[in-house]
Structures are given as structure tokens and as C-alpha cells.
Amino acid sequence: MTPYGFLLALSLMPLGMPLGVALAPSQAQPANPIGTAVLGFKERVADYIKLHKEAQSKVPKLTETNDLANMQSREAALAATIKKLRPDAKEGDIFGVDFRAVLAREVRRDFLGRSAADRKAVMQEQPLKMRLSVNMTYPTDKPLKTFPAQLLQKLPELPPDLEYRIVGHHIVLRDVPANLVVDVARDIVPKIAG
């Protein structure tokens, strides 16, 4: 910096500001905890998708989609391969503690913004009583209702092979081609009175 530039900088400095403060390098601002949680979730999703693709490469490709038995067989083989690649998978591995809090806040806000009739309708469409665990096959006899669109817009976008599901008061992360529960965030969806 030239002497003139230094004097100009000093003259623009507010009166009473200590000289050391004005000349100190800018300090890093603390990270936004919500942004950090979302970024962490997206990174864990990306890691899971890598694993999913590895599993897909080990399973024969589906050449005919008209044969239901062939499709179910491939789905089961893909799920089994993913389970072998994630033998110690547990709740929270993908959602994480930090993102679970963000998820709970967004779901609560969404439900509070809905009318009582709308909240009740959303819950009536979902399977209420279902035993859930990570790495389980999502039961084919249970409905796969559409996730509420308004809420979906508020959550991080997922790759096509994953989807959010509401099951009772829980949010499930489901692997679509494998029909596999990837993660569960329990007691996220508010209880509806009445």
C-alpha cells in the first residue's frame, strides 16, 4: 500500500476506532448452522448414492420391464447388495443429528401453516403403524402416498433414486430402485389432536 493509500484508509476510518482493529485481517464469520447441517446431509446423500451405484454395478441390469417377477428379483438383489455394503447402517447415518433438527423444524413449520383439515388429510394418507428399521425392505403391502408437495419444496432436493416418505410420525429416506429404508428420523411429524 502506498503512503497516500494508507493515509486515505486512515482518514476513512470511523473516529475512536482503535488502529489495531482497522488494520486487523478480517476474521472468518462462524458458519451458518442450518447451512452446515444441510451441506452435511447432502454430502451423506452423495456418499450413499456412490454406494448405491456400486451396488447397481454388481447386480444384473434389468433388460425387460414387462416381467414383474424379473423386476422384483432385481429389486431384491439390489437391496441385498446394498445391505452387504452397509452392514452396520443405523438410524441417523444419513439424516445426521444436525440435519434431523432442521428437518423437524421444517416439518413443524409446514404443519403449523396448514389448516387442521389439511393436516388431518396428510396424516390419513400415510401408513400410520409400521415397524421401521434401517436396511429393511419397505413393505409392498403398505401405501406409498405422495409426499406433501409444499413440504417437499422446503427440503433439500434428493437424487432420483431416493425419496422422502412419511410413515406415522416419522420421516423415512427410501431407496426407490431397491425399495429399501435408508434412514429413519423418528418423531418428526407433529401429532394431530382429535
Image (tube, rainbow, N blue to C red):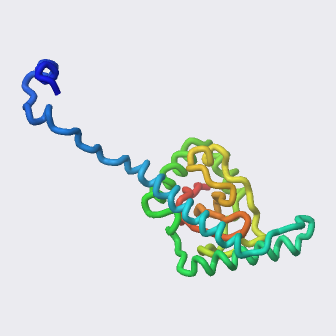
Horizontal arrangement in the rendering, residue 81 relative to residue 11 (left or right): right
- The image position of residue 160, as x and y in percent, is 69, 55
Residue at 60% x, 50% y is 157
User: Which quadrant holds residue 16?
Assistant: top left
Farthest residue, direction front:
2
Image quadrant occupied by the C terminus: bottom right
Image quadrant occupied by the N terminus: top left
Farthest residue, direction right:
66
- The image position of residue 70, as x and y in percent, is 87, 74
Residue at 34% x, 48% y is 31
- The image position of residue 174, as x and y in percent, is 65, 64
133 vs 160, nearest the viewer = 160
Horizontal arrangement in the rendering, residue 166 relative to residue 6 (left or right): right
Residue at 74% x, 72% y is 139
4 vs 65, nearest the viewer = 4
24 vs 2, nearest the viewer = 2
Number of numbered discs overlaid on the protein picture? 0
Residue at 70% x, 71% y is 57
Horizontal arrangement in the rendering, residue 84 relative to residue 88 (left or right): right
